[in-house]
Image (spheres, rainbow, N blue to C red):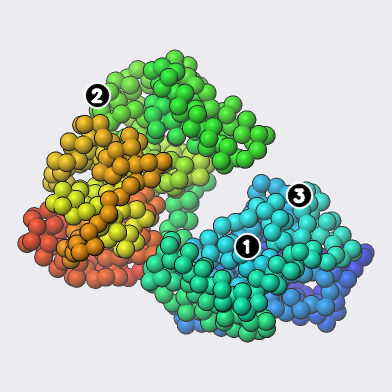
């Protein structure tokens, strides 16, 4: 059948029963991405199969990590820049449609990750079988890139599993486990990994109809009246999570589905045009840039081996206890030390809750619990490969701890601090071997915040920095190396935003008004709610450390509340009253008119300090700065980060606003050093991240 044909990215074989197995194995990569060369070859293969149909076709992956991670985003970005994006989308749709129309049964055998275009290839097959394994994840995550599926996902998935399940998967971008995929009808069969291909072939030998209940739901939820009724509900739900002007993709997806009729040709045309339009939006360009920033952070360690098996954490408070729990969750042996067991037990209880939420089954939860051990006496120090100090923010207390801990450590063990603001040059004076001392600054809540700042000083060895980067990768965190100056990167940029917001709150601007303005800009949480969530005591402590360095005053109200014990969410009382973990925000007089500059007063200090951080080389380049602030603060991802936002808005325009604020409100708004840096004016197409992509 394939005599004389040779492909770089596909292999094929035909068994004695006449079943053809196609193996996707993209040349030169560790995972399958669906670039143009892969799809070109698939078209040639499918055309040959349509001329000489075999008994059936099984499509599988030759890569260990999974089936496919989706489209090649570097290629996608180039097609968008060249104006060829619609043609590219339509070509992919055409090839998948040819696959769907093969006159023989087709089965996609899925293991590991199956995302985006990989899932759409599976949807173009008649059947799907998935490996019954925790690593199997199937999804359409395009929404996270400011897009929606474009190779038939919107046209096929709702008709396969019903609109409610399909729209939930596409609108959230979440991945379904093998069991979940089977339950909703996304896959037809589950099989053990070693029997995956044989099960797929058996589906060809013994064809079966989908359960009538699934077919009925798929039909009923996609007829014209159902689409017209459900679409407004979906739009309202999407608007509660994202503003259309910030994130247009969810709303475009809903409209494509609402308008899609019974003809798949019409549905594909709607999908392609909508996808091409979204690809040209600033949101999409910035979110794809953020994706590559994330990939860059993941790759900073290179091939370095961290050599860490046992982690010892000193300090079982919220941060220390949660760091210990996260490390145990990710497979490390962990000992957790504090003065008495009564301080350690709450951390163990929180860890159990985390494990139950993430691991689900007793068979997976119990080993994680066994990996995390209370260690009041500090007996784990001599065997630890990494010791993390996570006690309260006090220079002398931390230095005293290092003097007591370091002599008992292994010669090659790393010693790290989770300090959020104290300069490492001050801390390292108490360390006998400063080459192994560094900062590992996690963010609260540890289980949700992806960033860890790798805090440097001039005596940290390059090899140990690489080990720390590799360790962060092993615990599924994104590391960004930063200079060990006060506040490092994230807190240094965040603190002017929080302090100015607190100042406005003290001036009488209602907290809900400030929070609403910040969320309108695109921040995930308003500054007043954030201050309560972080803890007013922590905000005051970090503010006291950074205030003199940044030339900023701590608002009197923040200091008074922190000293009175009203620390915010953790105490139930702060700037807001909290009940069941949620703030009770006071009603705002409908006649209240806020000042017209509150957004600028909040956001521009962040931008100003970001420029100063770049000038001071707190990070190595602008891309790492944007990555750190996005993943450390949640800074509006659709804006691409503070430096990218400055480029998009215009340097001169923002400087002019800072000058106006300075004349109106004080010198704290004066432009900081660095606004004349050529790096600020570098177009996005010339930044290091694009070269890496």
Q: Residues within 10 Å of mark 2 (few under 14, many from 20)?
A: few
Residue 193 numbered mark, or none:
3
- Residue 81 location (% of width, % of height): 44, 78
* Side (left or right) of 618 relative to 47: left
Label 2 – label 3 distance at C-alpha: 55 Å
Residue pictured at 61% horizontal, 65% vertical: 164
For marks 2 and 1 on the same chain, the one whose residue lies earlier in the sequence: 1
* Nearer the observer, 19 or 136: 136
Which residue is the site of mark 2? 396
Q: Are marks 2 and 1 in contact (CB under 8 Å)?
A: no
For marks 2 and 3 on the same chain, the one whose residue lies earlier in the sequence: 3
Nearer mark to the viewer, of 2 and 1: 1
- Residue 50 location (% of width, % of height): 80, 80
Q: Residues within 10 Å of mark 1 (few under 14, many from 20)?
A: some
- Say what secondary structure mark 1 lies in: helix
- Residue 392 location (% of width, % of height): 31, 29
Nearer mark to the viewer, of 1 and 3: 1
For marks 1 and 3 on the same chain, the one whose residue lies earlier in the sequence: 1
Q: Are marks 1 and 3 in contact (CB under 8 Å)?
A: no
Q: Quadrant of the N terminus?
A: bottom right
- Residue 689 location (% of width, % of height): 41, 62
* Side (left or right) of 63 relative to 270: right
Residue pictured at 39% horizontal, 52% vertical: 631
Residue 165 numbered mark, or none:
1
- Say what secondary structure mark 3 lies in: helix
């Amino acid at each position: 059948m394939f005599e004389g044909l040779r492909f770089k990215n596909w292999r094929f074989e035909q068994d004695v029963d006449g079943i053809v197995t196609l193996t996707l194995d993209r040349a030169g990569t560790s995972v399958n991405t669906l670039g143009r060369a892969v799809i070109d070859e698939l078209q040639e293969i499918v055309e040959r199969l349509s001329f000489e149909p075999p008994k059936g076709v099984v499509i599988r992956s030759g890569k260990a990590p999974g089936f496919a991670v989706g489209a090649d985003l570097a290629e996608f970005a180039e097609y968008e820049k060249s104006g060829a994006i619609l043609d590219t989308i339509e070509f992919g749709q055409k090839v998948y449609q040819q696959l769907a129309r093969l006159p023989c049964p087709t089965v996609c055998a899925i293991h590991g990750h199956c995302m985006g275009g990989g899932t759409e290839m599976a949807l173009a097959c008649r059947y799907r079988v998935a490996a019954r394994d925790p690593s199997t994840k199937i999804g359409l995550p395009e929404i996270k890139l400011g897009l929606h599926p474009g190779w038939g996902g919107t046209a096929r998935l709702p008709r396969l599993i019903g609109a409610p399940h399909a729209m939930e998967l596409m609108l959230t971008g979440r991945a379904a486990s093998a069991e979940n995929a089977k339950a909703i009808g996304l896959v037809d069969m589950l099989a053990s990994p070693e029997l995956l291909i044989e099960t797929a072939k058996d589906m060809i030998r013994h064809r079966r109809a989908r359960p009538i209940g699934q077919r009925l739901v798929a039909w009923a939820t996609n007829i014209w009246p159902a689409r017209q009724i459900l679409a407004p509900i979906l739009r309202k739900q999407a608007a509660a999570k994202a503003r259309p002007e910030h994130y247009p993709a969810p709303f475009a997806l809903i409209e494509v589905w609402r308008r899609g009729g019974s003809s798949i040709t019409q549905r594909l045309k709607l999908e392609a045009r909508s996808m091409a339009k979204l690809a040209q939006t600033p949101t999409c360009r910035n979110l794809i840039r953020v994706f590559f920033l994330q990939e860059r952070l993941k790759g900073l360690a290179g091939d370095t081996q961290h050599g860490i098996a046992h982690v010892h954490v000193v300090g079982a408070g919220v941060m220390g206890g949660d760091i210990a729990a996260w490390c145990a969750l990710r497979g490390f042996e962990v000992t957790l030390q504090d003065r008495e067991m009564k301080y350690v037990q709450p951390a163990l209880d929180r860890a159990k809750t985390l494990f139950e939420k993430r691991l689900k089954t007793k068979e997976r939860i119990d080993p994680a619990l066994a990996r995390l051990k209370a260690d009041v006496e500090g007996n784990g120090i001599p065997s630890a490969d990494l010791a993390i100090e996570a006690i309260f923010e006090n220079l002398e207390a931390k230095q005293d701890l290092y003097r007591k801990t370091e002599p008992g450590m292994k010669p090659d063990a790393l010693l790290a601090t989770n300090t959020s603001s104290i300069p490492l040059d001050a801390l390292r004076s108490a360390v006998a071997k400063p080459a192994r001392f560094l900062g590992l600054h996690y963010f609260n809540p540890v289980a949700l915040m992806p960033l860890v700042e790798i805090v440097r000083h001039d005596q940290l060895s390059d090899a140990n920095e690489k080990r720390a980067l590799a360790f962060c990768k092993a615990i599924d965190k994104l590391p960004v190396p930063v200079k060990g100056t006060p506040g490092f990167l994230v807190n240094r940029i965040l603190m002017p935003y929080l302090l100015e917001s607190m100042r406005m709150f003290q001036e009488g601007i209602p907290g809900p008004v400030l929070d609403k303005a910040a969320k309108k800009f695109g921040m995930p949480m308003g500054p007043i709610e954030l201050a309560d969530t972080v803890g007013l005591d922590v905000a005051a402590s970090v503010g006291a450390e950074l205030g003199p360095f940044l030339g900023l005053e701590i608002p009197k109200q923040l200091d008074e509340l922190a000293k009175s014990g009203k620390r915010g969410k953790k105490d139930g009382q702060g700037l807001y009253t909290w009940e069941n973990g949620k703030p009770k925000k006071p009603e705002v007089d409908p006649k209240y008119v806020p000042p017209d500059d509150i957004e600028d007063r909040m956001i521009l200090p962040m931008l100003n300090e970001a420029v100063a951080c770049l000038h001071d080389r707190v990070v190595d380049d602008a891309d790492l700065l944007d990555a750190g602030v996005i993943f450390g603060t949640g800074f509006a991802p659709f804006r691409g980060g503070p430096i990218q936002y400055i480029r998009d808005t215009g340097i001169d325009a923002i400087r002019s606003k800072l000058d106006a604020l300075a004349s109106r409100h004080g010198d704290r708004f004066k432009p900081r050093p660095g606004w004349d840096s050529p790096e600020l004016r570098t177009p996005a197409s010339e930044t290091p991240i694009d070269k890496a992509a």
